[in-house]
Image: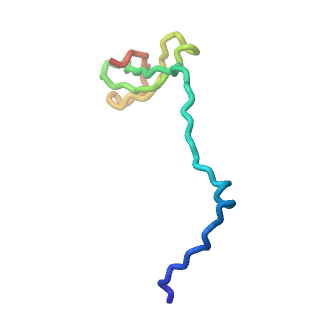
Amino acid sequence: NKYCHTTKQQTTLEGQANMRPTVVLSMARGKGKTIPIKLMSSAGTGFFYTTRKNVSKTPNKLSFVKYDPVVRQRVLFNEAKIK
């Protein structure tokens, strides 16, 4: 019969000794060094991008030239805090 399901032979206890259950250990981790920031458009449109910043590597404020779709040009985006 083509619909008949055949099973494999049962494994012995010796074969099962090698199969151990996987255990996920959660190790203690330190706090993350990145914080989320908001990049506000200097054109005053209220448009913003969000990104993450590593505070220990870049302690000063970030500023990028990115595209603002409201005024349809590239403008300066300055870092602001996310409230």
Spot occupied by residue 63 in the image (x, y as percentages of width and height): 48, 17
Residue 31 relative to residue 80: left or right: right
In which quadrant of the rendered image does the C terminus lie? top left
The one of 58 and 20 positioned closer to us in this rendering = 20
* Residue plotted at (58% across, 15% down): 57
Residue 36 relative to residue 28: left or right: left
* Residue plotted at (38% across, 15% down): 81
The one of 10 and 71 positioned closer to us in this rendering = 10
- In this view, the residue farthest toward the bottom is 1
Display colour scheme:
rainbow
Spot occupied by residue 52 in the image (x, y as percentages of width and height): 47, 24
Spot occupied by residue 5 in the image (x, y as percentages of width and height): 51, 79
* Image-quadrant location for residue 27: top right
Spot occupied by residue 9 in the image (x, y as percentages of width and height): 61, 73
- In this view, the residue farthest toward the front is 13
Residue 18 relative to residue 43: left or right: right
* Residue plotted at (55% across, 40% down): 24
* Image-quadrant location for residue 49: top left
The one of 73 and 57 positioned closer to us in this rendering = 57
Task: Please give the count of numbered marks on the rendered protein.
Answer: 0
* Residue plotted at (40% across, 21% down): 38
The answer to whether 7 is drawn above or below residue 78 in the figure is below
